[in-house]
Amino acid sequence: MNNIINKQRRTLLKYAGITAATAGICPNLLFAMDSSKGNRHASANFHPDVEIELTQQTAQISIMPGAKTRIWKITGKVLKGSQATVQNLPGTYLGPTLHLHKGQKVRIYLRNKLPAQSILHWHGLHVPADMDGNPMYAIGSGETYVYEFEVLNRAGTYWYHAHTHGLTAKQVYSGLAGLFIVSDDEEQALGLPGGEYDIPIVIQDRSFDKRNQLAYSNHMMQRMQGFLGNHILINGQPDFVLPVATRAYRLRLLNGSNSRIYKLAWDDGTPITVIGVDGGLLERPEKYPYVMLAPAERREIWVDFSGRDIGSELTMRSVSFASSSHGMMGGGMMGGRRGGMMGGGRMGGRGGMMGGMMSGSAVPLGSDYPVLKIRVDRKTGDNDSLPHRLTPINQLQINNAVNAGSPRRITLSMRHMSALLNGRSYKMNDVKADEIIPVNTLQLMEFDNGFHRGMHGMMAMPHPMHLHGEQFQIVKRQVNSRGTSTYKTVSAGFVDNGWKDTVLVMPGEKVTILKPFNDFKGMFMYHCHNLEHEDMGMMRDFLIK
Ligand code: C2O
Ligand code: CU
Ligand code: CU
């Protein structure tokens, strides 16, 4: 095993043309990486402002009433710097929320005490290739990986999660994920709601068996569609109710689900005010009737409860949409089956907000169900007002792309038991000529989900496409005639302004983006963030050189 890893690492170094000098790491370190058992050690010439330790281990916690649930838990500890950097979350499987400021240099000791290989990836962060948690850096049980990087990103709601070859879906599902919140001076000067009025909302679905254990099935239907659970959890908790005061809040929504896509709307018809997306704040607030939230995407929203009565409630629901134009997978068929399942299921057994959903079977994708319940429970006099302008965004220009006339096309397809990018399945260290990108270039790219070739039967599915490294911008969306009816059920909820690292590509759609590849050479992944698709092979590496 270790031999394989070391061989892969040597191959990578050869491929990437990385020398100790270009990678910006000391020769000792390179030697250590190549000869140790997957450990990466601290480097003597990196001087961290903050040092933290993240330990991954098995644990048991109470999630559902009754028996405890076995989970995989990350716990954090500050070794140097402010204690506020790491906020452990005891009652949930979620890892600690990390709070960092732009410009801080951070060293993270990842200690793997799980009975499995693992590695963590900093989703949305612009870090060097060997700090990015590529699966080739997975460490075994008992090993430590030391990350060292400067936080270059602007303020925003980023996150981290396991990225282990073939096991990402299961490991994230078991608990290996958490938030990575970055602040900066520009954002702080805006005076947005802070402290207890700035609340992360991590939305995930899980299934529990009769003994309250996390259930995860590997059968083909589930892998093709992606995992869909029977409970919606907020910050790792079922039946979550958020108590609020009569004032404005900043809610940071992350879809941390393996595959579930949400179409979020307030149940009283209030528009959703979006102030930020994956890569931080927008230029100005934007109002939507509903917002789409695909796996790994973030939306920061502003919601003001002033003027609402004490005791009143507001619910964010996921409202119905179509996810496949053929009705073979997703919305259509699953929606149709719902009634039957509910008849025979253990309905309402657990009561509370999810009581109306069946507890035995999956909540169908694209059906209508509550996600987040909010209760106004106290009065407060102070409030913040929504700024008209948030933060300026440097608009990328197509003319500045090195390939302005010939976008790099990435076709998305599913066939038998595989999910493919440009017809290829994931393989470690398998960079093809069209996957080599010169460093410090701006690239025009398009994700083609059947726009050119037309769709084939049940294989047309939505894919949330993610690129590692720097954030990108969405240039345009086009949909073909076969995808139009599906598309119309979701398109008013795309928030396409601002900086993005994940974009939902619907069946029959082509999405064009501008993606910068600055500063760092080496391997950076691109993949579908439906984690079952990712593990089925819908993932590749770009080699930046
Ligand atoms: Cu959030 Cu490569 O992933
Ligand atoms: Cu990522
Ligand atoms: Cu996919």
Image (cartoon, rainbow, N blue to C red):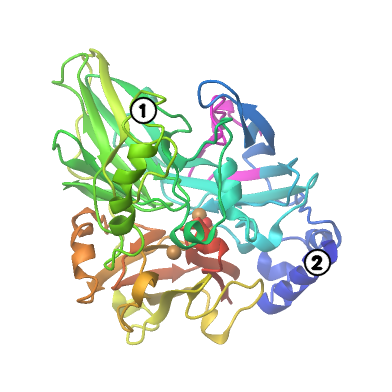
Label 2 CB less than 8 angstroms from ligand 1: no
Which x, y percent locates residue 376?
25, 19
Residue bearing the label numbered 2: 6
Q: Which mark is residue 507?
A: none
**392 or 87, nearer to the observer:** 87
- Give the number of the mark in front: 2 or 1: 1
Q: Is residue 524 above or below residue 288?
A: below
512 sits left or right of 58 in the view: left
Q: CA distance from mark 2 to mark 1?
A: 52 Å
Question: Mark 2 or mark 1, which has the lower sequence index?
Answer: 2
Q: Amino acid at mark 2?
A: Asn
Q: Quadrant of residue 484?
A: bottom left
Identity of the residue drawn at 44% across and 53% down: 259
Which x, y percent locates residue 231?
42, 37
Which x, y percent locates residue 8?
75, 70
Magenta-colored span = 79-107
Residue bearing the label numbered 1: 348
**230 or 445, nearer to the observer:** 230
Which x, y percent locates residue 465?
42, 64
416 sits left or right of 11 in the view: left
